[in-house]
Every structure is written in structure tokens, then in C-alpha cells.
Image (cartoon, rainbow, N blue to C red):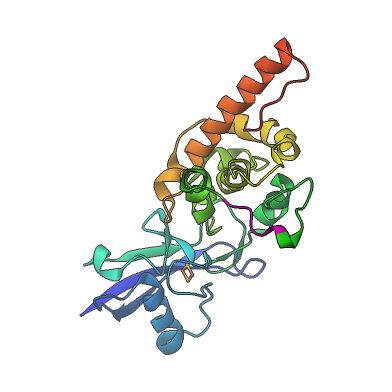
Amino acid sequence: LEITLEVARYRPGVDTEPTLQSYQVPLREHWAILDGLTYVKDHLDGTLSFRWSCRMGICGSCGMTVNGEPQLSCATFLTDYAPGPIRVEPLRNFPVVRDLVVDIDDFMTKLPKVTPWLVREVQSPVEDGEYLQTPEELDEYQQYSMCINCMLCYSACPVYSLEPDFLGPAAIALAQRYNLDSRDEGADERRDVLSSPEGIWACTFVGECSAVCPKGVDPAGAIQRYKLTAATESIKELLMPRSRSRR
Ligand code: FES
């Protein structure tokens, strides 16, 4: 039994536009789209380009558009699309480097702007031991720490497709991952970039980012939560100019 993969092929600067190329691959139980593409590469056409690394939904490198939806190709199965055909294209909203490989430099440039690490104003001496947290404190941010930077949320985001300067779902969710961490003291540092016109206020709460996230992160929820924080802080500053809450 076989299934047809219709795969986007494109070499910028050489081809005038992307074209779809059809390949017949074995329709095997437990074969992911990535297994089908690997079969093509190994047995049918070694020129096909795509990214992958872990094959288990952890590294975030195998994002593609499968039948119009952003998916991790290692976690999306051929049998779910039988009898086919299955259209496999690069993630939308990113420049194509070649075939299914996209350029995510835009995200890599934006991410450091939200200071995506723990900020401590004063480091405790090592002999004082770990910064302990309660399970409740862990629950506050754990969901956002599951992000694997796969870019499915940017590919699904209608705002990012129209406003490329938008900071974007994953970067804002990762900012909240640290803002909501009881060990962090960097909320003020992240505030200006998050509250800028390209930050949370650009989001129109369509929610597609959360719908496509393969790790159950809720970037749309993170953005709405920070909107509430920012609005509350603005009101407090109007009333008490020196007051500023952390989250
Ligand atoms: Fe790592 Fe798919 S290959 S997430």
C-alpha cells in the first residue's frame, strides 16, 4: 500500500516559483510525514531538502505545512491522511531557503529582545543552595516553558503575516515564562518591548497560535494575560507614578 506525497520544491534564485512534485511512499502504520520524506530522500530523490533532528517532537526543527495546516512532520502520521494525497509545503510566513527549509532569522533576532532568561539583580552565593519554588509557583509558568521554538505559531498567525514587525506568539509566551517565574526579577526589563506597538497590542486574539501549538502552550492566553498586566500597571502609574507591579 502506498500514499502520494505532493511536496513543494523550490530553489530561490533558480526557480521562478514553487512547484509540487509527487512521490509514492509506503503507507506504513506509525510512519510520520517525516518518515515519508526520509524515504523520498533515501530512495527516490536525494535533492529534496528538509530539516529535522530529534524525530520525537522535542527539537522543533521539522515544522511544515501539511494539507494547509502547520504541523510537526515527525508527529503527524501518514495514516491520518489516507488515502491521500498529502500536500507538504514549507511553513508559511517565512522566506524559503530551499524546498521545505525556511529561514527563521526574524524570530532569532526578536527573541533576545524579550530577555528570555532568568534575571536576578543580586546573585545569592552558591553555598546558599538552589532558589526553591513551591509546586504552585512552578505551575504559574511551566506551560510556557514547554515551547520548542518550532515556529508553527508564527506560521499560523494572521497578524504576523500582515505585520512582520510583530514580536510574535512564541517570543511573548517565552517572555511570560520568565515574568511569571518567582525567581525572576526582569519584568521591568521586558516591559517596554512587550508593551510596544509591535508587542502585545498588535495581537488581535485570533488564537490560531494556541490552536496549532504541538506542546499545549497557550501563547494567545499569555498575550491576553500580559495585556491585563500592562493595562493595570498603566492605571497604577497614572494614580501612583512610582508604583509598578511585576507581572
Ligand atoms: Fe524534532 Fe520533529 S524532528 S520536533
Residue 161, image x, y percentages: 57, 43
The residue depicted at 69 percent of the width and 38 percent of the height is 187
Q: Nearer the viewer, residue 109 or 50?
A: 109
Quadrant containing the N terminus in the rendered view: bottom left
- Does the magenta stretch mainly form a helix, a strand or a loop? loop
The residue depicted at 56 percent of the width and 37 percent of the height is 159
The residue depicted at 51 percent of the width and 57 percent of the height is 91
The residue depicted at 51 percent of the width and 78 percent of the height is 48
Q: Nearer the viewer, residue 151 or 5?
A: 151
Which segment is the magenta one?
128-132
Residue 40, image x, y percentages: 41, 81
Farthest front residue?
127
Q: Nearer the viewer, residue 182 or 35?
A: 182
Farthest bottom residue?
43
Residue 236, image x, y percentages: 68, 16
Q: How many marks?
A: 0
